[in-house]
Image (cartoon, rainbow, N blue to C red):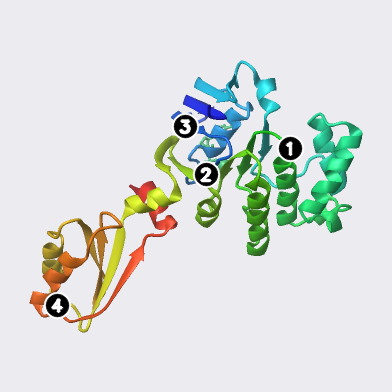
Amino acid sequence: MPILEVKSVTKKFPTPKGEVIAVNNVSFSANSGEVLGILGPNGAGKTTTLRMIATIYRPDSGEVLVDGIDAVKNPLEVRKRIAYMTQEPDLTPPLSVRDYIIYYFRFRGFSKRDAKKHCEDILELFGLKTHAHKKPFQLSTGLKRRVQLACALSSDVPLVFLDEPTAGVDPRSKRKTWELIKEKLEDKGVTVILTSHDLYEVEYLADRVIIMNQGKIVAEGSPKELKKRFGKTVRIVLEEPIKNFELLKEELLRVKNVKDVRLARDDSFDVYFKSLDDSINGILQVISPQELKIKDIFTATANFEDVYLEIIER
Ligand SMILES: Nc1ncnc2c1ncn2[C@@H]1O[C@H](COP(=O)(O)OP(=O)(O)O)[C@@H](O)[C@H]1O
Ligand SMILES: [Mg+2]
């Protein structure tokens, strides 16, 4: 059974300009031990979706099941099974890092003694020992985020939400965060729902990805599958500038599996194939009779960002 099932969930907000459908009939599920990435531009509905699963918002319609438990009917039971790292880097109440972590675990129902012991382990594991005495105003965004991450990932719950965990974090701390997430998740069956604007981060961490736009899911699959669907691009560089590109393009578009042809520079063009496995033989057969001399050929697989942008702009 999946640890999370979201079934036809919709959430609307009244605003002065009329009703906003933040999440529009969204369904997905997550399996135990999986990292599920949710991608999408600002306003796509990612945070609203997380908040409904986390029982902060009540869906207008649809159903959310966490570990088989209905999030609307039984929010307290669901809350015991989830940890939520929110997208804001604030630590409230403004305690020292050590006291904050102890407070967090006391809140989660740990005894004083267990919370203290757990806190020392976490400070060590997440490289926070030297910062343990600092108050929030003495911490960089990266460190605040790390404290929040440490709490969420150490909560010993089956479902963890990380809402933009590295937004505003410098590149080195980002790497550190990724390592910590990977390490921490390696041997446990914890499921993580991750939202991010960093496509590299999502590709690195997520087993599967959902792409949202305007409240709806517009694509779903592993980063690899999504890239595969996008196909292959070949750049052909000629010895001389191309005289009649439109004619060349017309002929190339007749070649099997060619999706698009675009001029790159005056002496080079890109051919977009439908799939990664397509052969470039056909395009060579178009080029050679025209007495165009090829200087170079590169094959480029689309990167995850290209794929994302294509899906969002479509
Ligand atoms: N509490 C709220 N009141 C009114 N509108 C909201 C509220 N929360 C979110 N929205 C609107 O819902 C849409 C989705 O927002 P959100 O879920 O925060 O998107 P994301 O996290 O993908 O950036 C946006 O149009 C946003 O303005
Ligand atoms: Mg958000």
The residue carrying mark 4 is: 243
Percent x, y of residue 48: 55, 33
The answer to which of 141 and 297 lies nearer the viewer is 297
Is 69 placed above or below 195 here? above
Q: Is residue 40 left or right of residue 151?
A: left
Q: Which amino acid type is shown beneath numbered disc 4?
A: Lys
What numbered label is drawn on residue 37? 2
Q: How many marks can you see?
A: 4
Counting other residues with Cα less than 10 Å from the Cα at mark 1, is it few (<14), some (14-19), or many (20 or more)?
some
Q: Which amino acid type is shown beneath numbered disc 3?
A: Phe
The residue carrying mark 3 is: 28
The answer to which of 277 and 20 lies nearer the viewer is 277
Counting other residues with Cα less than 10 Å from the Cα at mark 3, is it few (<14), some (14-19), or many (20 or more)?
some
Evaluate if marks 2 and 3 touch, with contact meaning CB atoms under 8 Å apart.
no
Q: Is residue 308 left or right of residue 121?
A: left
Mark toward the start of the polypeptide (3 vs 4): 3
Q: Quadrant of residue 159?
A: top right
Between marks 3 and 4, how big is the CA–CA gap? 51 Å
Between marks 2 and 4, how big is the CA–CA gap? 46 Å
Mark toward the start of the polypeptide (4 vs 1): 1
- For this orientation, the residue located farthest to the right is 113
Q: SS of the residue at dot 2?
A: strand
